[in-house]
Amino acid sequence: MSGTAGKYIIKILVTGIAVFVGAMCLAGCTKRSPAEISKDTPVDAFLPSLSQEAGVYGGYFFIPINDKVYRYSMDEHLDNEGDVGNVIFSCTEDGCGYSANYVFYESHSYPQHEKIIACCDGTWFTVKYAPALKSSKGVIEDAIAANFVVVNNGEFLNGEKLWDDFTTKAKKGQKSSVMVGQIYEQEGNLGNDLRRATKEDYPMVFFTKIVFDGERYTVSPIHYVGDVFVEYCEPGYDMPENSYRFLKCDEETPRSDKVTDRFVSWYFVDDESVSYRQIMSAYLSSVRLPDGQGGLGNHRLLFLIKNK
């Protein structure tokens, strides 16, 4: 791998990540595998990107096909050009102190362009179609109707009592379960390229199911398929199902007098001594610590709620 290509591909992998959670199913949620879902769920046709400027920016590849621009993301490294076909598009991306040259080719294995072969200064890899992540219209209303806890911008949009009931039962060691929807808006402090590349993704909603069996919390991803909430994991998109020993909440004290909002952070850990601040410090650190999770063991952030 050439130096400039290597640097740029690492940049794509980092900036392309959006900051972006079994047991019996709850009412209104059926549990099926992705393969089973694909049998009766129509696949949407590829939709062109809202950003009609072709090129590489914000961790994505914007490739013109038949007079429309489609968004792609990094897929897999290739040892060679593989089943490369005709050239689709080429461009040069200039960064801080480096320049990367891209050529995109048709792949004979994917004639509908689900994947495209790319070469960056001698390095071969594939990119895959990256549809907008913006949640479908009405999904939040349907989640509320299905008794989800819904959190938006640090506040309960629905289900505050449901959450209180769930955590109260869990503290007493009683079996309990709850479904949660978290709404994400586009951050105000994003760089121009990343903002432009991801504007079609917001608002997005991630749904999860949390089940406490009396000893551990199991957290599973849920998707809204058609008009039903379905429990399954989408590889490369969801955090896979996992279980944790503790559900903790920490109140964050503002570090400045100018910051007036106080938040309560909810998160899962196996080590009860781990704090929210430790987790955030590990995420923001450039140092790789042991065990692949910042040296903090098995953990997962859930949501922040403004402390009234």
Image (cartoon, grey):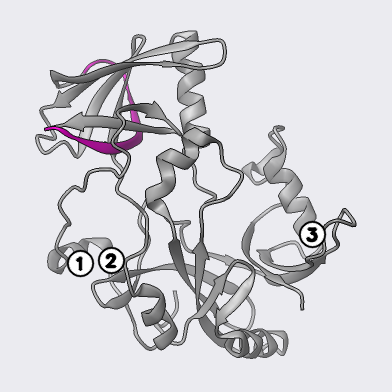
In front of the other: 89 or 168: 89
| Residue, disc 1 | 36
Query: In the rendered structure, which amino acid carries the disc numbered 2?
Result: Ser
Residue 78 within the segment the image draws in magenta: yes
Residue drawn at the location 28% of the way across and 36% of the way down: 52
Q: CA distance from mark 2 to mark 3?
A: 35 Å
Quarter of image, res 231 = bottom left
Which SS class for mark 1? helix
| Residue, disc 3 | 275
Quarter of image, res 287 = top right
Which SS class for mark 3? loop
Question: What span is in magenta?
Answer: 66-81
Query: In the rendered structure, which amino acid carries the disc numbered 3?
Result: Ser
Residue drawn at the location 48% of the way across and 56% of the way down: 239
Q: Which badge, 2 or 3, is on the more N-terminal residue? A: 2
Which SS class for mark 2? loop
What type of secondary structure mainly makes up the magenta span?
A: strand
